[in-house]
Amino acid sequence: MNRNTISLILCLASAVSALTGCGSAENGSTAADTSSVAAETTASKAFSVTDCHVMQPPEEGWTAKELMSVTYLYGRQLTYPLTLDALGDSIELKNIEPNIAGNVHATLCHGGQVVGNVIFSVKNVEEVGQDTPIDQFMFMGDNNTPDSLIINGKSIDTEFKDMQSCLGEEAKNGESSDKKICYKTKGDSFTLAVLNSDGMFSSLSINGLCKAQ
């Protein structure tokens, strides 16, 4: 089992263990915080794939900057390096703690619902801030918002077989299967995988962003 597989398992495990960890009435939430989340949620509902920047999948594979430029989370275009600031005010960070690999992982929540998790390449929780680069990002989908995640013009719940048209060539050293496809990144400097549930694009996993080209 290689490092990328272990990382994906850790991401999935931390997300599952945190399914009840996004209560909106705890952890110091304020009226201002709630208002900010509501405003961004409303904006994301009005956002659609037709508003997105798209590009032809690069022949040499995706750079992290290119990939972020075509990825939208709740209507917000992501940027590289990926940070909490880049994810936007509607995303809450919960359950921040060290993991067994010696990094810090946390649960991502939106509107009180667990939607994914992140891993930072730092050893101590105290080192995590709004501008700390995210090394691993996993988004598991949001049943309340169909266009919660859009990547190069394709949203969550797109038919899985259609994802190659927007993400390009599969990675030669990836571990693709009927449940997961790994796509080519420039120099294989990071891993990009989309996951399949009942024939639909259900989750996105990006690992190794801190060393990405």
Image (cartoon, rainbow, N blue to C red):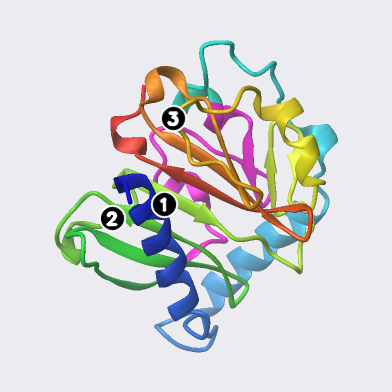
Cα separation between marks 3 and 2: 33 Å
User: Which residue is found at the position 51% from the left and 28% from the top?
Assistant: 171
State left or right for residue 70 relative to residue 13. Answer: right
**Image quarter of residue 45:** bottom right
Extreme residue toward the top, this view? 59
Q: Position of residue 183 (x, y in %)?
A: 56, 31
Cα separation between marks 1 and 2? 8 Å
Marks 3 and 1, the one that precedes in the sequence: 1
Q: Give the number of the disc on residue 129.
A: 2
Q: Amino acid at mark 1?
A: Leu
Q: Which residue is at 77% across, 51% downward?
A: 147
**Disc number at residue 179?**
none
In the image, which disc is placed on residue 173?
A: 3
Q: Secondary structure at mark 1?
A: helix
Q: Is residue 93 visible?
A: no
Which sits earlier in the primary sequence, circle 1 or circle 2? 1
Badge 1 vs badge 2, beta-carbon distance below 8 Å: yes
- Rendered location of residue 14, percent (x, y): 40, 71
Per the rendered image, the range of residues in magenta is: 67-93
Q: Where 186 falls versus 69 (above or below)?
A: above
Is 69 within the magenta?
Answer: yes
| Residue 119 sits above or below residue 66 on the image | below
Of the two numbered discs 3 and 2 in the rendering, the one whose residue sits closer to the viewer: 3
Residue on which the image places disc 1: 84
The amino acid at mark 3 is Asn
